[in-house]
Image: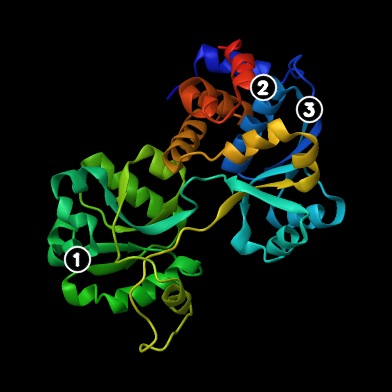
Amino acid sequence: MKKNGHALALAVAMTASGGAYANCGEVSVGAMGWASGESVAALTSFVLEQGYGCSVTIVPTDTVPVVTSLAETGQPDVVPEVWSNSVPAYDGLVEEGKVITAGNTFANGGEEGWWIPQYLADKHPELATLEGVLANPELVGARFHNCPVGWGCRIVNDNLKVVHDLEGNGIEVFDHGSGANLAASIAAAFEDQAPWFGYYWGPTAILGKYPMVKVDLGGVNPEQHRLNQVEGQDAGKIGVSDFPAAPVLTAMTADFANRAPAAAEFIKNSALPNDLISAMLAWKEENNASADETAAWVLTNHTDVVMSMVSGEAKANLEKLF
């Protein structure tokens, strides 16, 4: 998980001008202001430039500002990692035909749930379901690691702990004071190969560093999950539901799709597996790497994934760099 010469050389190339291939014109790519958003934007930019001959400008942005910009100016042309459930206006732009949802940036969406370490699931496969956990509380350390106060997951977890009677089944609910403490509890468990059971989300650097298995909570019931999200919910209204995946989308403008159809096809194919995203984030954090260096790491270590997204001509162009 260290920087290597090939990745660094490729990262340098990513700052250079686009390749001398069939020109797809000027393209703007929105880079969300967090680690995965910046890195995926850098990866997208590099493939568009070197594979498709686009001249790319990366536009730093955030969820609400980028949707506003798309509505008012029709820019940026391409925006990876739009968490559409946090911006209701996005659906309106799709309905108006201004914006096209090209696909999922994260192949499995934004994941939330209750997890156990992989080594625990390997030793005790029954713990992959909540029924197995409740029947064997001692195997998970008789503790559930909960979210901090103020997080949306805390409300859901506080309702689910009642639904599943965690404490009645011998599982203490431990409320963490911060996200850092929650992450540290996972790191400590892995260091000692100790039991751990609790809430986390992905893709994240934590899940990239520490392989975890999501516990099956009994399937997703969207309406029930909505009710479980209400703080202080009536006990008669809470019920069984796992956490649904949050849609994490790649958006592109209709104008871009019309004027650069080959490049647009790549954007439609550019979903990345969640475990790859988590591994990417872990590498970026461990190496204090830039977005370009992180994108170069993906290109050099998961070349097959990237190549599966592009056209034959773009593949041939990109292969010249490896």
| Residue 91: % across, % down | 68, 62
Circle 3 SS class? loop
Q: Is residue 35 visible?
A: no
Q: Which residue is mark 2?
A: 51
Circle 2 SS class? helix
Q: Which residue is mark 3?
A: 24
When the figure is inspected, residue 81 is found, relative to residue 161, above or below; the finding is above
- Label 1 and label 2: CA atoms lie apart by 49 Å
Picture disc at residue 131: 1
Residue toward you, 50 or 157? 50
Residue toward you, 212 or 190? 212
Circle 1 SS class? helix
Question: Which of the 4 image quadrants contains residue 28?
Answer: top right
Q: Earlier in the sequence, mark 1 or mark 2?
A: 2
- The amino acid beneath tag 1 is Glu
- The amino acid beneath tag 3 is Cys
Name the residue at 57% across, 23% down: 296
